[in-house]
Image (cartoon, helix red, strand yellow):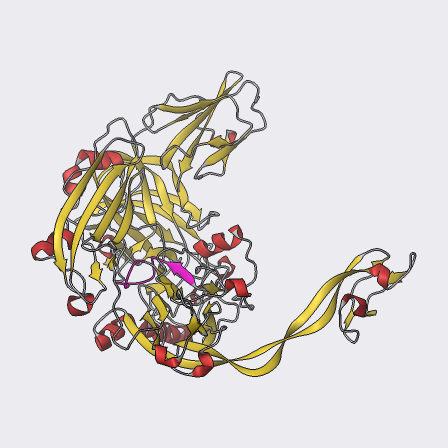
Amino acid sequence: MNFRIHITILLLALTVVGTAQEVVSGLQFNETIMQEAKKINITERDCDCGRTDESQKVTLPFYDDFSTSNIYPNQELWQGRSVFVNKDFSYMPANIGVATLDAIDSVGAVYKNATSAPFRADELLSREIRLDSVFTQSPRPLFPYDSLYFSFFYQPQGVGDAPQVYDSLVLEFARYSGDSVFSHIDSITVNSRIYINQGEVINALDTLYAPSSLGCNPYMYTIVYSQYSYDEEIRIACDSVFIPEIIWDEVWYSQGLSLSDFYDTIGRYMQQVMIPIVDTNYFTDKFRFRFRNYCSVSNEYYPLTWKSNGDQWNLDMIYLNYNRNAGDTTYKSVAFSQRAPSFLSQYQVMPYRQYRYSPTYFTAESIHMYIANLDNIEHNTKYTYTVQQVNGNFSYSYDGGNCNLKPFYEVGFQQCEGCGASHACPPVNSLFSLDYDRDTTSYIIKHYISDSSDQSSIVDSAVYHQGFYNYYAYDDGTPEKGWGYDGAGGAQIAYKFELNTMDTLWGLQMYFNKTLNNVNELYFDILVWNDNNGRPGDIMYRQEYEKVDWENGIYKFVPYMLDDPQIVTGTIYVGFEQYESVSYNIGMDANFDASDNLFYKTDSVWKGATVAGAILMRPIIGENMILSVDSHENDIYGLTLYPNPTGTSFSVKNSFIDNASAELKIYNMFGSMLLTTTDITDPIDVSRLSQGIYIVRVISNGQLYSAKLLINR
């Protein structure tokens, strides 16, 4: 949390009588990490920092720019999974992809020991590195005069939460003292037959000594807490394990500060650090290093919704090698920094029908690419991008030609002037296709920057998925923060969207950040307003008593469907009215700023949001269904689809449908039939269908049943 906001909220809590205000919070749960942890069966909230074997040791050079790994660090180089590898939390990094140290553990939750005082949080621990030898064609020992340097880029805060001045990022090197220290008790599984005869039992609180015949220490014993019969397996202590004592030397640290203060101090958004390694204690075959961060989160004066992720640090381009020097701060690399942008002028995603009505208005004239030459010499670069329709024939490309790009340390990112304009600010030189037989479509946009002037070509790429689905979105689908309005019951939140032709509003997709014990599982009314000179006007629609809810999966939006879909056109505002006077903690994308379209009020005056970002709220828009109405058409409970929403498949659950006579059909919002099957006992595969709303109809014994299906990936 920003330090000024941190102090303000504390004072408000202490004085009890608060003033209504916008509030921004970090995440209490990182769903990307949570889902990955479940996928690979990680349950322990620790760094998994055991010793490595010989086959896991790393030889020089050691290098990681975090562009190829995802979610967890590359386990061939690193040990432990508490650090988050991502493309979302950094700002203007050296290249796309960073390792973020924060207050979230390896299973995606805020550390249990998190407090308002600095506590030890994430750890980025290297595997053992061979600093005893140089492995070239003629292997030889490595010595201090081989000019060994360790370097890395770092950044506080990024687009996340700024570390407080009493928080810190620490770098430590490992050396061995020559002594041994206790590590853990080794245990084995034995059969109860070695202790008792048939018909006897081992009672709870009995003492079992480890059997020396199995190589255990005969003085080691275990007190059991259960009763065991003859021929049962028992886990007992076998021996104490001692390991070489490691002393961790602090070789560098940074105290916490905001990104703006960091930039004001050094004049850039990421700083490279160079550290020479000359101490002979480090020149072993078991050298290791680690980064650690100390965090502080909200205290008992805050509501539980404030105990959240924060104090973030981003690391990039960690490099350890010999034959370097203090001036070896450049890399033979031409790279994109920020992620590739949308080709739309206002949105990340919008309904295809709305785009087709006014494609020129909604297509951006140009985009901004952040390109850096990380080398120490000028490179003649070539920039291109390609656009290819997914499951379609439409495509086009852009050739930005060649341009000389000076080193980053001289000029920073490529400027939009001269030949650089065709690379850094290329035009969007074509509209997207206008397929009137489609309700949704999408495109893969690939950007390339290269320099093939020598034998080893330098190439980097960035990819953007441009979607035209049944909703509007200012956000990219990933929340880096939470946003809300605190201190006033009845507060109204309104989000502005623009329609150029009449359409149907079916509901809202919303993503609320989870909080500890789900304390923001609160009720609200859905509201729709018309426009009043750039502010929300009259309430056109109200739907009462909805509740904050969550779906399983990575940042799955929850659809809140309107009981009475609304015909809308022009400028509309969608949102909700809070029942409670606390922040509902809706997700906020910190990489895109749509604050000009976000409004709130507690009385008769609408105010514009002051926090930069895009909240994760999306109106579901689509053309009227061209389907006949049957007596069962509106009986949404007569046909249950699960999961709904879905990404790839769904099943039908209905006790009074005769599966033997059933026929299932799926229609899009235009009434076109897309899929039919008579086998509804197995999951129905919809992976080839685009995102959007569909109508599922089942005919069984002359009866028709219908339900809406939302496909959302």
Quarter that holds the N terminus: bottom left
Residue 515 horizontal side relative to residue 528, left or right: right
When the figure is inspected, residue 561 is found, relative to residue 369, above or below; the finding is above
Q: Which residue does the image show at 71% across and 66% down from the upper left?
A: 187
**What is the magenta range?**
84-96
214 part of magenta stretch: no
Check the image and name the residue furthest to the front.
138
Which of 71/516 is in front?
Answer: 71
Quarter that holds the C terminus: top left
91 part of magenta stretch: yes
Q: Position of residue 567 (x, y in %)?
A: 28, 34
Which of 530/356 is in front?
Answer: 356
The mark tally for this picture is: 0
> In the picture, residue 656 is in which quadrant?
top right
Q: Is residue 214 visible?
A: yes
Which of 403/691 is in front?
Answer: 403
Residue 125 horizontal side relative to residue 338, left or right: right
Q: Which residue does the image show at 55% across and 18% down from the upper left?
A: 661
Q: Position of residue 694 (x, y in %)?
A: 39, 31
